Amino acid sequence: MSAYASLETHFKKINDLAHVSAIASWDEASMMPVGGGQARGQAMATLSVLMHEMVTQTQVGDWIAEAAQARLSAWQSANLREIGRVYREATCMPSDLVEAQQLATSKSEQAWRECRAANDWNTMKPLLAEVVNLSRREAEVRSSASDLGLYDALLDTYEPDVRSAQLDEVFADLKSFLPPFLDQVLGSQAQETLLPVTGDFSIEKQRALGMQIMGSLGFDFEHGRLDVSHHPFCGGVPEDVRITTRYDTESFVSAIMAVIHETGHAMYEQGLPKDWTSQPVGNALSAGTHESQSLLMEMQACRTKEFMNFMTPLAQRSFLGTETNDPAWSADNIYKLYTRVEKGFIRVDADEVTYPLHVILRYEIEKDLIEGKIEVSDLPALWHEKMTRYLGVATENNYTDGLLQDVHWPAGLFGYFPTYTLGAMTAAQLFSSARESFKGLAGELGQGNFENLLFWLRENVHSKGKFLSYNDLMMQATGETINASYFKNHLKERYLLNR
């Protein structure tokens, strides 16, 4: 067996273990009884160490060196490149640190679910502090191996080749644009008439409507399912994608849009190159690219007036039992509901105008946290100060709606938050190109027809996996690298010009 063939066989075994880990992780977040937490944490830690040890075996490095001299196809060469990336990222991490992180994050994440509900910062604080300390150790190890800065070393694991200096520049641009724009939008929307929508928003009916919309978008139910968790997410594997949402029986807006968002993630997974599913090159390109697929569906396609014309009668039949001429249930009023802008506490419920400010706040805090400029004990006051300054809402002593609202830090996902806003900009640019390719796309969305949009995404994004770099993918799909003007123009068109 050649060195390259040995690598493919080896990484297929690793992928099989990752498959089991992904399903077990989904189960922990959605189905597992509380009493199973300790044992599950230990089992996940053991599995994590086993996969780490397989990736870092000395023979893997030898195979990589030997395979680099072989004649390979374009996809094989790309796979070898990605195997090399996985190997380099893993070999710098000692097994005892990997195990300590798995145990600490499992314990912290399980506690977070209870602490958030109970507004209990004191219990959460030492658990989060341990996760932060281990993440700082990880940053030091990765920084030493890559010559990147501490935060950049973690960011690189989610967005290869993106650096905090680039983010600082992009986010500074958004911070200068968004506050005055936000004031304009709030002033404009203050003149609108918004009618409250009432009906039977039971979980069962919301779930049924969500699944109906998932089908219209193109979700393959033979290879995925919808469940409930504390925090909406997409997990599992391409052949078995698991998405979750959470429900509010007072309103159907947030749950339906969360379902659409996670469906965008899931359809990216379902569209990855099937011939390479078991190999690193067959994975999603990056966290920001993944987020672009969820935001393209949620924000670009499904908050349009055209889509509201399709969805409104479905919602009427779901929650009223029949269609109605009630002005509150008109497509125009529903559109205004779905594009309402306000300064709020919760990131996952934020509109697309204020959302980047939530991300920038978290990015600034976690960067300083990893670089040791602040400590976990500083978080409540710092969170309150930034939320008040950026969004005009106070979070003092409100941990449930404040710094405990997200699972990312308890789970040790430092470097992840900025990818959300990178994803928003990418989504706007990709959707603009898709509309150029299919001039009648808006009308198709108005009929609940996503076939051409999904075809374009499959051709230009999903099927590429990690074959192309991010910049090369954007060049091929849109004709240029990332350009924030598409996102800004999208916001101006939707919230000021097209009301």
Image: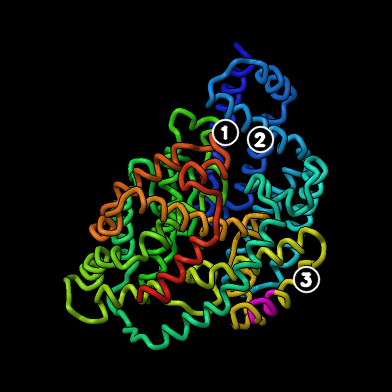
Q: Nearer the viewer, mark 3 or mark 1?
A: 1
Label 2: few (<14), some or many (≥20) within 10 Å? some
Q: Nearer the viewer, mark 3 or mark 2?
A: 2
* Residue 86 placement, left or right of 24: right
Q: Are marks 2 and 1 in contact (CB under 8 Å)?
A: yes
Observer able to see residue 409:
yes
Residue 377 is marked as: 3
For marks 3 and 1, the one nearer the N-term is 1
Question: Which residues, given as a range, are shown in magenta?
Answer: 383-388
SS class, disc 1 = helix
* Residue 405 placement, left or right of 85: left
SS class, disc 2 = helix
Observer able to see residue 118:
no
SS class, disc 3 = helix
Residue identified by numbered label 2: 86
> Looking at the picture, does residue 94 appear above or below residue 61?
below
Which amino acid lies under the numbered mark 1 shown in the image of this protein? Answer: Pro
The residue positioned 30% from the left and 59% from the top of the image is: 442
Task: Name the main secondary structure of what is drawn in magenta.
Answer: helix
Q: Nearer the viewer, residue 410 or 123?
A: 410
Which amino acid lies under the numbered mark 3 shown in the image of this protein? Answer: Ser
* Percent position of residue 437, x then y: 35, 48
**Quarter the N terminus occupies:** top right
Q: Nearer the viewer, residue 97 or 427?
A: 427
Q: Nearer the viewer, residue 39 or 157?
A: 157
Residue 47 is marked as: none
Q: CA distance from mark 3 to mark 1?
A: 39 Å
The residue positioned 66% from the left and 82% from the top of the image is: 396
The residue positioned 27% from the left and 64% from the top of the image is: 311
> Looking at the picture, does residue 95 appear above or below residue 129?
above
Residue identified by numbered label 1: 280
